[in-house]
Amino acid sequence: MRILRRLLGSFFLGCVSVQLAYALPITITDPYGGQNNSGSSNGDVIGALGGFDIESLTFTQLSASGVTAGIRFNYNFGDASLAPYTFAGSTIEVGDLLFSVGGSYRYGVALVSHDGLLAGKLYSILGTRSSDDYLGSSGLGYRTNTPVRINPTGAVVIGDGTVSTANIGGYEVLSSLNFTPSASFLIDLSSGLDVGFASAVCTNDIAEGYIGAAVPEPSTWLLFATGLAGLLWWRQQHCKTQLPARYSDR
C-alpha cells in the first residue's frame, strides 16, 4: 500500500507539470470608443480622448515559454515614444501593466523604463503607486487613489522581456509586450489573475479585466486516464501475488 501511495503521488505531481490551456486570444476591451477623436469626455474618459483613450488589451500567448500581449490606446495624441508630457501644468506619464491576485498586486510590467525599472521585464512587486502619488496636489480632475504603476521599492525582476510601441494611425499607439513568466507567475496565472492598465498616471482612462483559470489540454486528460488505469491494473496484479496459494487457483 505504501508503494501504491508513492506511485499515486508521483503520478499526480506529473499531471500538475503538464501544460495548461487557455482560450486565446483573451481580449479586455474598453466599451467607450473614440480612438481618433480629439474631443473630450466620451463615456468613461476624463479629458481629451486623443490623450487618454484605451481601446483594448489582448493576450495572444499565455504559456511557460512566454506571455505576449498588445495594448491599443491613445497617448498624448499618438506619441509612440510614450514620453512624459505636461498637461495643465502637471507631468503626465504612461501607466504600467499590473497583475493582481485576490486584490493584492503581485506582478507588473513597465511599458517604459522609470524609477530604476526596466521596460518589458516582469517584476515581482510589493505594491503599486496610485494616481494620487502623481497628481494629489495638482487640482486636476482624475480618478483618485487608483493603482497606475509599480512601486519600485522591493520590486524584483523575475522574467526577461521586451516591449515596443508604434503609432498605428491617428492618435492610436500599439504597445507589444513579450516576457518570460516565472514559476510563481504561472502558478497564480493557472488559478486566475486580475489585469489592470491605465493609459496615463491620471487614470483618465483605465482597462481592467480577468484572465480566468486554465484548463488542462485534452492530452492531459488522456494521460491522466491512462495512468490511472495503469495504476489500478498494477494494484490488481500486486494483490493477486499477495494471496495465499489456496486462493490463487480459484
Image (spheres, rainbow, N blue to C red):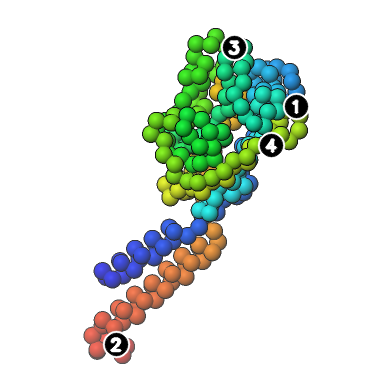
Q: Residue, x 39% and y 30% (percent of image)?
A: 153
- Give the CA distance from mark 4 to mark 3: 27 Å
Label 3: few (<14), some (14–19) or many (≥20) C-alpha neighbours in 10 Å: few
Please give the residue where the numbered disc 1 appears in the rendered image. 36
Place residue 77 in its image quadrant: top right
Q: Locate residue 196, reporting x and y percent.
A: 54, 33
First in sequence, mark 1 or 4: give its number.
1
Please give the residue where the numbered disc 3 appears in the rendered image. 89
Label 2: few (<14), some (14–19) or many (≥20) C-alpha neighbours in 10 Å: few
Q: Residue, x 51% and y 30% (percent of image)?
A: 114
**In this rendering, would 232 be left or right of 69?**
left
Q: Residue, x 53% and y 33% (percent of image)?
A: 113
Q: Locate residue 83, reporting x and y percent.
A: 61, 27
Query: In the rendered structure, which amino acid carries the disc numbered 4?
Result: Ala
First in sequence, mark 1 or 3: give its number.
1
Q: Which residue is nearer to you in this view: 87 or 222?
A: 87
Query: In the rendered structure, which amino acid carries the disc numbered 3?
Result: Gly
Q: Residue furthest front?
A: 116
The mark lying in front, picked from 1 and 2, is 1
Query: In the rendered structure, which amino acid carries the disc numbered 1?
Result: Asn
First in sequence, mark 4 or 3: give its number.
3
Q: Which residue is nearer to you in this view: 17 or 124?
A: 124
Place residue 106 in its image quadrant: top left
Q: Which residue is nearer to you in this view: 34 or 164?
A: 164
Q: Quadrant of the N terminus?
A: bottom left
Please give the residue where the numbered disc 2 appears in the rendered image. 248
Question: Is residue 187 visible to us here?
Answer: no
Please give the residue where the numbered disc 4 appears in the rendered image. 166
First in sequence, mark 2 or 4: give its number.
4
